[in-house]
Amino acid sequence: NTVFADGVPGADLLVIGEAPGRDEDRIGKPFVGRAGQLLDRMLAGIDRSRETNVLISNVIYWRPPGNRTPSPMETAICRPFVERLIELTKPKAVVLAGGAPLQAMLGVTGIMRARGKWREIETHSGARFAALPIFHPAFLLRQPANKRLAWADLQALAARLREG
């Protein structure tokens, strides 16, 4: 199934994840499984939710076979659509949840080094948007000791959104 987005169109915060998993494919919305539940709690910690002020999507809109990481070809095919979503949404901040969106949108590898450092996404049309790489919630479920780093990243995100 196509899993495009969930949340508030035009929200000032856009979260971009990797790809739909089994639950997302079944339900048709991004981040609805265990990782999605954690993402919702993380966002609630900074007074954000997909019901009021967040839009959530992925770098590809279909579940990869075997639930593998999206291939460079798959992300390249979807990138123009992701860029257009960013341009139409005009968010104050884009959160790149995990290594796959970091690689797909910024051409950077290594989420451990990149997380928590503000960067900039430049779309094909030349528009620029602030982007913050963070750990994917699924990673935090496997490595809960990193939640303190994720909390620091969320605090930086909240401050940036308050600044405007």
Image (cartoon, rainbow, N blue to C red):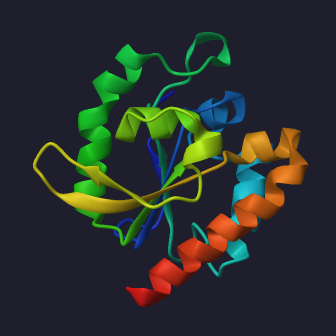
Q: Is residue 119 above or below residue 75?
A: below
Q: Is residue 129 left or right of residue 95?
A: left
Residue in view at x 30 percent, y 34 percent? 79
Residue furthest toward the front? 113
Q: Nearer the viewer, residue 100 or 86?
A: 100
Tell me where residue 38 sits by quadrant.
bottom right
Q: Is residue 152 above or below residue 94?
A: below
Residue in view at x 86 percent, y 38 percent? 142
Q: Residue 37, position in %: x, y?
A: 77, 55
Residue furthest toward the bottom? 163
Q: Is residue 121 above or below residue 142?
A: below
Q: Residue 99, position in %: x, y?
A: 57, 36
Q: Residue 121, position in %: x, y?
A: 31, 51
Residue furthest toward the left? 125
Q: Is residue 112 visible?
A: yes
Q: Residue 135, position in %: x, y?
A: 66, 48
Q: Is residue 66 left or right of residue 127?
A: right
Q: Nearer the viewer, residue 58 or 24?
A: 58
* Total labels drawn: 0
Residue in view at x 75 percent, y 41 percent? 138
Q: Is residue 148 above or below residue 63?
A: below
Q: Is residue 33 visible?
A: no
Q: Nearer the viewer, residue 54 or 150?
A: 150
Locate the C terminus by quadrant: bottom left
